[in-house]
């Protein structure tokens, strides 16, 4: 990762970085080469995709070189360039990355946790998006908590501003934007919809997203004849999300597990009242007066929604503008980028371990059997890397553009021309 080191591994959990050390101060201001690896990236849409893209853009603005590695999506293969020269490798390979909280009891969790232990035992530093996610990661991978920091997600607040004029105030609209999968609690949503629609004739649901659980919602809509009150919008592009959110009064999240949940921050930023399950890192995200937390059951969620609906009818809720003003000060991508930069600065001051010590760490940290197996795999990987370097030398590689190179110059010229241009409000 950064500067040929195994730097900050993004396991999507996060926390404040500890005070600056002598090494951190020494490396501050150093430009890093950063690789973001994720199974989830554009053209898919979601919290992970937005996190990687927006954080990468902020790091590029700060002069760092950033590339993204993900798997191919249909015809989207090879190398693509996004805004500001962000280089993306769409590999024709399977990519598996972990972006959720995992348990410890079932077989799949045990196997996944062992893989996580092996993956992170040779990592200098880990960044998580919530304290809950940090605790989960430390326990699963048997890590030293001192090398795990928490840095939250953020929202591009200019893209999520309120617009009460888009609401239909003759009814109350509940908005749900989520992947329609089991982990997002869509089965809970299918139980909430008929119960609340029966009690409140003016209640409507706007549901954006796609996934295998869409069929469950379609069956509920068909069974209870709610076609005019439950709209399934299908997959949404990022630019269309705000247009859906501003139509609602309440944002509902029914997730069964979440490390952070950017969706509730986006909903609050658009001025909606938020109702969510009390799972994972969600209780850390918003102040208590901006979110109603419920247990992950149909009864608890219905009770929470009833409370918010009653407040909405009585007009005893904060105005969308005031909610937006509070949320925009809580999370900003530039703040996230600055804190992430401190992690890379800190790691660059650490010793680079030779191969034999790294293999020894694998054996001691992962156990004599599993550790030896994975140490052998690591040696094979190292030999394969040497072969690739001989077969295709570094000098022949197509390097990503440096932030201080052509893309950086283009951004500087665009910024200067924009500052010289008359504003729309300032006259001709």
Image (cartoon, rainbow, N blue to C red):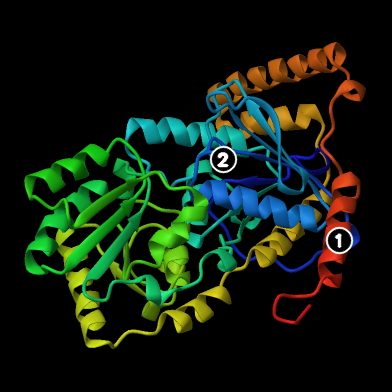
Q: Residues within 10 Å of mark 1 (few under 14, many from 20)?
A: some
Where is residue 62 drawn, in percent x and y?
A: 80, 58
Q: Residue furthest front?
A: 428
The image quarter in which residue 252 lies: bottom left
Relative horizontal placement of residue 101, taking residue 62 as reference (left or right)? left
Up the image or down, 379 lies above or below 416; here it is above
Residue in front for this viewpoint, 185 or 74: 74
Residue 320 in view here: yes
Q: Residue at x 87, y 59 (%)?
A: 412
Mark in front: 1 vs 2: 2
Q: Residue at x 58, y 47 (%)?
A: 143
The image quarter in which residue 174 lies: bottom left
Where is residue 389 drawn, in percent x and y?
A: 84, 18
Q: Where is the C terminus found, in terms of image quarters?
A: bottom right
Up the image or down, 324 lies above or below 198; here it is below
Q: Residue at x 80, y 37 (%)?
A: 353
Relative horizontal placement of residue 377, taking residue 132 as reference (left or right)? right
Residue 261 in view here: no
Residue carrying label 1: 28
Residue carrying label 2: 42
Where is residue 204 drawn, in percent x and y?
A: 21, 62
Q: Earlier in the sequence, mark 1 or mark 2?
A: 1
Up the image or down, 252 lies above or below 31; here it is below
Which element is circle 2 on?
Answer: loop
Residue in front for this viewpoint, 420 or 272: 420
């Amino acid at each position: 990762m950064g500067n040929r080191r195994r730097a900050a591994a993004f396991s999507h959990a996060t926390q404040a970085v500890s005070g600056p050390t002598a090494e951190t101060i020494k490396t501050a201001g150093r430009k890093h080469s950063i690789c973001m690896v994720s199974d989830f990236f554009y053209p898919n849409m979601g919290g992970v995709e937005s996190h990687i893209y927006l954080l990468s853009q902020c790091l590029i603005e700060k002069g760092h070189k950033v590339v993204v590695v993900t798997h191919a999506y249909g015809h989207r293969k090879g190398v693509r360039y996004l805004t500001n020269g962000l280089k993306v490798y769409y590999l024709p390979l399977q990519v598996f990355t972990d972006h959720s909280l995992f348990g410890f009891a079932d077989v799949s969790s045990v196997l996944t946790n062992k893989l996580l232990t092996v993956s992170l035992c040779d990592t200098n530093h880990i960044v998580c998006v919530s304290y809950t996610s940090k605790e989960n990661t430390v326990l699963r991978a048997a890590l030293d908590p001192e090398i795990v920091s928490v840095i939250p997600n953020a929202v591009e607040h200019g893209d999520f501003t309120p617009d009460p004029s888009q609401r239909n105030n003759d009814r109350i609209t509940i908005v749900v934007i989520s992947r329609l999968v089991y982990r997002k609690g869509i089965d809970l949503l299918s139980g909430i919809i008929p119960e609340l629609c029966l009690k409140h004739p003016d209640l409507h649901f706007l549901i954006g997203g796609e996934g295998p659980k869409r069929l469950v919602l379609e069956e509920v809509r068909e069974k209870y004849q709610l076609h005019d009150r439950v709209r399934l919008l299908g997959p949404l592009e990022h630019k269309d999300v705000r247009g859906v959110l501003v139509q609602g009064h309440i944002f509902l999240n029914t997730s069964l597990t979440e490390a952070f949940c950017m969706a509730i921050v986006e909903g609050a930023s658009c001025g909606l009242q938020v109702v969510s399950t009390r799972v994972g890192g969600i209780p850390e995200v918003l102040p208590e007066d901006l979110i109603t937390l419920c247990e992950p059951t149909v009864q608890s969620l219905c009770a929470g929604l009833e409370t918010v609906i009653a407040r909405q009818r009585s007009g005893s809720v904060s105005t969308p503008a005031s909610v937006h003003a509070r949320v925009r000060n809580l999370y900003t991508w530039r703040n996230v980028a600055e804190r992430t930069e401190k992690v890379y600065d800190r790691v660059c001051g650490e010793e680079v371990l030779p191969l034999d010590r790294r293999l020894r760490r694998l054996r001691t940290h992962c156990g004599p059997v599993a550790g030896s197996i994975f140490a052998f795999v690591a040696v094979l990987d190292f030999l394969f890397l040497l072969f690739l370097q001989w077969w295709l030398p570094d000098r022949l590689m197509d390097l990503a553009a440096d932030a201080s190179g052509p893309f950086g110059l283009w951004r500087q010229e665009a910024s200067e021309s924009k500052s010289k241009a008359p504003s729309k409000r300032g006259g001709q």
